[in-house]
Image (cartoon, rainbow, N blue to C red):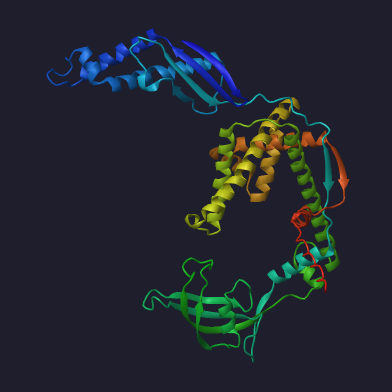
Amino acid sequence: MKSELKETSPTQREIHLTIDGETLKEAYGRISKRYASRARVDGFRPGYAPLDVVRIKFKEEIKGDVLQDVIPSKVEEAIREHDLQPLTEPHLHLENQETVKVNGSEPLSLHVHFEVMPALPEPSYEGIELVRRVKPVEDGEVEDLINERLQREAALVPIEGRASEMGDTVIADLEGKFEDQPDGEPIVANDLEVTLGDEVIEQSFTDNLVGVKEDEEKEFTVVYPAEFTSEALAGKTVHYKAKVKSVGKQEVPELNDEWAKSLDEGYESLKDLRTRLKADLVKLAEADADARVRNNAIAKVIEQNPFEVPNALIENQTRRLLNDFARDMQQRGVDLEKVEKQFIEMAYHNMRQQGERDVKAAMLLDEIAKRENVAVSDEDLNDELQKMADYYQASVDDIRKSLETQGGLDNISGNLKTRKTIEAVVAKAKVTDGAWVDEKAAAEVAAQEEKPKKKPAKKKAAKKEG
């Protein structure tokens, strides 16, 4: 056998093979005899037909079996000879496929091609310039947190002596029947809480339940829009009967020192609560800034070290991202079969770009880890497991056993190695502090500025009077 290796691209290899006639002749003879031993040919007892007759009758079958017998082993032999590690199954192409002979009268020529890992250049990562920007914490953010906490602790207080108003909460037993199926199974919802005016409530409920009192009964019709979130109700008309059980109003606790102390979180006063909440927000802002520095470090490393990525690796990562995306959409109640083709194509395009970045980052960080001698110690792993145990309120042993069962320890170790490698890159970068820039807002402004501005219409020349 002769083989010649060609590098068609940094990630593509092609091997031209010539399989000698002796190899083909041996396989042809062996496989022909196998057919002859069991062949049923008219005019002959099973297994007693002449070999030449069998070869004529089963010409294409024998040819296919010979090729299947010889080619894979010779391809593997050539791959080993050239010390290659394919990322994909080799694609084969026979020269003169229609007229190829397998009886050994002539050699067999073919070529195979497949993807391989590219040889990465020595990565450039030392001294990259990064800017760390911390988002300032506004007092309004603290007040928003306090208001959210107050709303969570609000109590529903019954209202007496008046009818329901906007902002009130009506509790009712509801029964509904579809207009197109009046004898069908009714919709039943007992003790349904309807906050009048709430954006998540269909407007018809608010319109019909404003002005009701306890024990009152009300009938009304709701026409649901075609794009309604519930597939069972979308585009349907439902006739409802409501039995009002109570009308109440959400009352939040009074904002004072006593309320702050009642939270059982060690706050001494309302001022202390505000101070500590702001400190927590500052801590989060600092952590976000550090995360952006790490993400920007990866982006800079990718930018400074261009190389071709094997398509197989990009496709594998793209499929993972798409599967995660689809799972998330399903959990949100989206019927994937009804998603528009254009949206799927856009999602694939975006995921493929992200997939290529992910693969490039992984390959470069792996190379940097070797140069920086990054390793994950038992102590590193134990510390991470302890954090997980604290979060899930479980023992470290239980977390470890669960991960071992699922094969997750290797993932944890791999993530730790990636994190330590990125930290090594940041440690050798030139990091400066900069003023906060809302990148999303800036991008929106830039997009608006890039839009072609409408030119003012030219003024018509004044008509000359003659």
What is the residue that sits farthest to the front in this orientation?
A: 466
- Which of the two residues, 251 or 8, is positioned nearer the viewer here? 8
| Residue in the image at 67% along x and 76% along y | 155
The answer, for residue 254, to whether it is visible in the render is yes
- Image position of 325 (left or right of 277): left
Image quarter hosting the C terminus: bottom right
- Name the quadrant containing residue 151: bottom right
- Image position of 12 (left or right of 133): left
Q: Percent from the top left, x then y, of residue 360?
A: 67, 34
Is 305 situated above or below 268?
above
- Total labels: the figure holds 0
- Image position of 408 (left or right of 1): right
Q: Percent from the top left, x then y, of residue 164?
A: 62, 86
What is the residue that sits farthest to the top in this orientation?
A: 22
- Name the quadrant containing residue 44: top left
Is 154 situated above or below 159?
above
Q: Percent from the top left, x then y, of residue 173?
A: 50, 80
Q: Percent from the top left, x then y, of residue 396?
A: 64, 42
What is the residue that sits farthest to the bottom in this orientation?
A: 161
The answer, for residue 420, to whether it is visible in the render is no
| Residue in the image at 83% along x and 51% along y | 134
- Which of the two residues, 170 or 331, is positioned nearer the viewer here? 331
| Residue in the image at 49% along x and 79% along y | 174
Is 239 situated above or below 336?
below
- Name the quadrant containing residue 430: top right
- Which of the two residues, 4 or 367, is positioned nearer the viewer here? 4
Is 352 situated above or below 46?
below
